[in-house]
Image (spheres, rainbow, N blue to C red):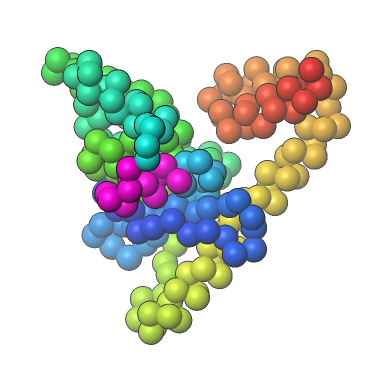
Amino acid sequence: MSLVRLNIKGISYSQTQNGAYALILNEVDGDRKLPIVIGAFEAQSIAIALEKEIKPPRPLTHDLFKNFADRFDIVVKQVIIHKLVDGVFYSSLICERDKIEEIIDARTSDAIALALRFQAPIFTYKNILDKAGIYLKVNPKKDEEDIEDNILLDELVAEEIEENVSATEIYKSKSLDELNKLLNEAVANEDYEKAAKIRDEISKRN
């Protein structure tokens, strides 16, 4: 499968959904955009990495990872968004130490936050971009384009949040035994986003 390089176009805050952000990745040699819904903390970390002049007084989690990696001569060479399942993107960090390459599983938002800090390229597979990539308006006036982009991103974020709310309501109706079984299944399937939601529901009851 062929890899497609992506750049970060920006981060959009939903005007209709509080606390929801969409990270927009742009196809380098094309017009498609890949929107990924991320949390507020990850959005902040990515935004700080994009703004070179902003330096937090204490290292954020991704800064700590970078400092740790630098200390032990570990380099993130590239990030690959390699899988899309039920709206969840899965990514890998391609790392190198002493000329030995290792592949580490990561949430896409974390992977991109680290890619920025290591100045590592971001890739995805063509079939993922074919499935989830979108075309935004190309030639309107800039203000009109921004409005169209924001409306579309709001719709995407709203759809994602609605799915998450529906899933949360389902978990509330489950017993602890059922939740623990679902948690084990989610972990076995490497669906860590789902596992996190189930774990949160279990924590509320303990």
Q: Is residue 159 left or right of residue 92?
A: right
Please tell me whether residue 185 is drawn above or below residue 135 in the rendered image.
Answer: above
Instruction: Please say whether residue 101 is visible from this viewpoint.
Output: no
Name the residue at the left extreme: 99
User: What residue appears at the point 53 percent right and 45 percent down from the top-left corner?
Assistant: 40
* Foreground of the two, 148 or 40: 40
User: What residue appears at the point 28 percent right and 25 percent down from the top-left corner?
Assistant: 67
User: What residue appears at the point 73 percent right and 45 percent down from the top-left corner?
Assistant: 165
* Foreground of the two, 135 or 150: 150
Please tell me whether residue 18 is drawn above or below residue 148 in the rendered image.
Answer: above
The image shows a total of numbered marks equal to 0
Please tell me whether residue 100 is drawn above or below residue 45 in the rendered image.
Answer: above
Q: Was residue 169 drawn as part of the magenta stretch in this picture?
A: no
| Location of residue 39 in the rendering, given as x and y in whole percent from the top left corner | 54, 44
| Location of residue 136 in the rendering, given as x and y in whole percent from the top left corner | 43, 70
Q: Is residue 98 left or right of residue 127?
A: left
* Foreground of the two, 44 or 202: 44
Which quadrant holds the C terminus?
top right
| Location of residue 128 in the rendering, given as x and y in whole percent from the top left corner | 41, 47
Please tell me whether residue 174 is drawn above or below residue 86 in the rendered image.
Answer: above
> What range of the chain is rendered magenta?
44-55
| Location of residue 82 in the rendering, given as x and y in whole percent from the top left corner | 38, 37
Q: Is residue 97 left or right of residue 178?
A: left
